Amino acid sequence: MTKTDQTTAPLYLGIECGGTRSIALLSDGAGRQIVRTEAGGANLKLLSDPQLHAHFRKIDGLLKNPRGVVALAIGMAGARAEMDRTRIRMAAEKVWPEIPCYATNDLETALAAAESASIEALPRVLILSGTGSCCFGKTADGKKTAKVGGWGHLLGDKGSGYEIGLRTLKALVFYYDRDEVWPALGQKILRSLELNTPNELIGWVQSAGKSDVAALAIEVFNAWAKKDKIASDIITAAAESLATDGADCARHLVKPGTPVQFILAGSLPLKQPRFAAAIEKVVLAAWPKGIVTALKRESVWGAIELAKKHFAEIGAGPTTLKIVKRDNAWIAEKLPVTNGLPMTEQRNPRSVNLDQLPVSEMIDLMLSEDRKIPEAIFDERAKIEKAVNFITKSFKTGGRLFYVGAGSSGRLGVLDASECPPTFRTPSEMVQGIIAGGQIALWRAVEGAEDDALAGAEAIQFNTITKKDVVVGIAASGRTPFVWGALLEAKKRGAKTILLCFNPHLVVAPKNRPNIIIAPNVGPEVLTGSTRLKAGTATKLILNMLTTLSMVKLGKVISNLMVDLNPSNIKLRDRAVRIVRDITGADEEAAKKELEKANWVVKEACHHLRLKGFSSRPPAISAPGNGGIRATAG
C-alpha cells in the first residue's frame, strides 16, 4: 500500500477491477494521492454476489477503513448493463453504507483517466488490451458513446492476452499434427507450465482459468522479439484485430475523415512498446487523421474523476445534494412516475393478525379478498376492450404482442405467450414474453434485474419493435424500472403501449404516459407486498382476456371452440376430433380420417367435410341451469 501526506479535505475513493488485478485509490479534491492499494482480479461476470461483497470488504480492509470519503466510483470488467451496475452498487452499499457510489465498467474509468490529457475537442477511442479486450469511445461533447468488443473470452476479446495465449496453443498443436515436430515456442510454453509433453496441455487447458491462458502471452511476446514465426503471426493478427475494432468504434461515433484521438490502454500495449507501435500503424492506415497516444496514468484515476463528476455537489451541504438514495442505491434519475406508496406495498387491515388465525379462517380471509378481484377488473373493462382492439388490429397488420415484466409479473407474461401457439396455432413470434433477467429469472430471482431500465429499453431495441406492435408492461406497483424502460422505448418507436398495474392512484407525467393504463383496485395484499397473490391472480385473468379475445376477433374461434389449436399430443388430438364433430356433425371415424388427411389442421378438416355435405354449424348444446342454447358459428 502506498501513502502520501494525509489531508483533512473531503476524499474521493476510486476502484478499478480488471481480470488480473484490482486497484483502489484514495485522493483529495486537488487530485493528490492519499492511499493506493492492490487486490486480486475481479470480473463481475465471474463473481457471485457474496464473492463481490467479499472482494469489496477486502479492499476496504487494505485501505484501513478510510474516513472522510464523500464519494466513490467503481469500474469493473464485465459490467455491461444497468443490472450489472446495480449489483456493484448494492455490494458497495454493504461495505460503504453512507457513501454514494457511481458504478460503471473499466472502459469508462480508463477513458475518464485519459480525458484530462486528451487533445481538446476531439472524439476519443480507447483501445484496451489486457487479459480481455475492448474498444470504447465518446464524441468530443460526450453525448454519444460506442463500444466494439468486450464480449468476454468465449465470444470475443480479440487481440487480448487470452486470445493470444489460446491461439498460440491451437497453432502449436496444428503445426505438431502437420509436421510431427513440436515447435520451439511450444517448448517454451511447456517449460513455463511445468508440463512434460504436449498431451498434458489437454488437461491443463480444460482446468485453466482466463488469467492462466492470458499469462501465456508473455512467452509469445518474448518469442516474437526473437522473430519466432508462429509468435509473429499471432501478435501481428492481434494488433490488426485491435486496430480494426478501434477504427470501427470511431465510425460509430463520427464520419471517416474526422480527426480522432485513439488511446492505447491495458497491460499489453503499455508494457509492449513494439505491440503498441504495430497497433498504431494499422490504426493510422485505417484512419489517416487519427492521433494515437498511450494512457499516461493509471486508469483508476478515471474512477476518481467520475466520482468527482457525478457527486460534485456533495460536501457543499445537504441542500445541494441532488443524488438520492433509493432501493439501496444512490441514483440521480427519477422514474417517470410520481405518487406515494403504491397500493401493493400498503398493509391490509383485515390481515394484520394473519399469523394468529386458525388455518380455516386464513382460507376464508384469502378467498374473501380474492372475491374482490372480478369486480375490480370489471371496473376496468372499457380499457381492456380498447386494449383488445389495439392488439387485434396489430395482429391483422402483421404486428406482434409483447408482455414485459419482472418477477411474478414477467413469469405470467411468458406463460400467457407460451400458451398461444398450442391453443391458437400462432407463430412463436406473434406473442412474446420478456422477463427482466432473462431465462434464468423464470425459476429464480435475479437480483437487481427489475431495476435495470436500460435493459428494458434494450430488450425492445433488439426485438426491433415498430409501430405495428403492441407492448404491454406488467408492473404490480406501476413503478418497475425495467418495465418503464421498455414502455418508453416502445413509445419512442411508435408502438402502442399499455401498462397493467394495481396502483389505481398512479400518476404518470403526460409525456411518458402509455396509450392505456389498466389499474384495477384489488386492494392491499393479504400478505403485505406479496403481489403473486391478488395482483398475480388479476394479472392472469386480464392476460387471458387480452389474448383469448384477440384470437376470437381473428377468427380462431368458432362458437366457443378453438378451431386453430395445434393437436400435438393424444389429449389435444382427441379434442380436435370432438371439435370437428361438434362443428360438422360428422361421426368420430370420419372426423379423425379427415383430420389425418389435413395434417391435423382443424379448420381445413372442417372445410373438407362441409364440401362432402356435412353441417356447417355446431349442434345444440345444453347448459346446466341455463336451459338449452344453440351455439352458432362465428
Image (cartoon, rainbow, N blue to C red):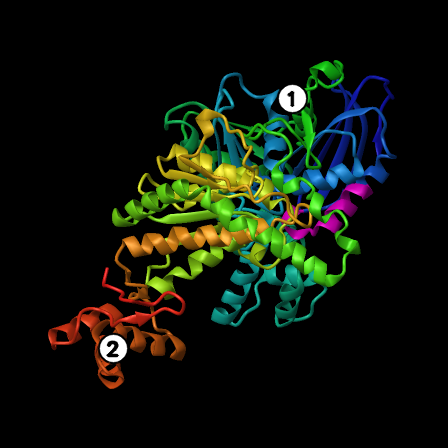
Q: What residue type is labelled 2?
A: Leu
Query: Farthest residue in the bottom direction?
Result: 589
**The residue tagged with tag 2: helix, strand or loop?**
helix
Asked whether 283 falls inside the magenta stretch, the response is no
**Label 2 packing within 10 angstroms: few (<14), some (14-19), many (20+):** many
Q: Which of marks 1 and 2 is nearer the N terminus?
A: 1
Marks 1/2: CA–CA distance = 69 Å
Residue closest to the eye, 272 or 417? 417
Task: Report the residue marked by disc 2.
Answer: 595
Task: Report the residue marked by disc 1.
Answer: 309
**The residue tagged with tag 1: helix, strand or loop?**
helix
Q: In this view, does 370 lie to the left or right of 178?
A: right
Q: In this view, does 320 lie to the left or right of 545?
A: right
Q: In which quarter of the image is residue 323?
A: top right
The boundaries of the magenta stretch are 43-58
Q: In this view, does 44 lie to the left or right of 607?
A: right
Asked whether 48 falls inside the magenta stretch, the response is yes
Tell me the quarter of the image containing the C terminus. Answer: bottom left
* Residue occupying the point 55% across, 30% down: 337
Q: Where is residue 531 in the image (x, y as percent from the top left)?
A: 61, 49
* Residue occupying the point 66% across, 52% down: 46
**Label 1 packing within 10 angstroms: few (<14), some (14-19), many (20+):** few
Q: Which amino acid does label 1 sit on?
A: Lys
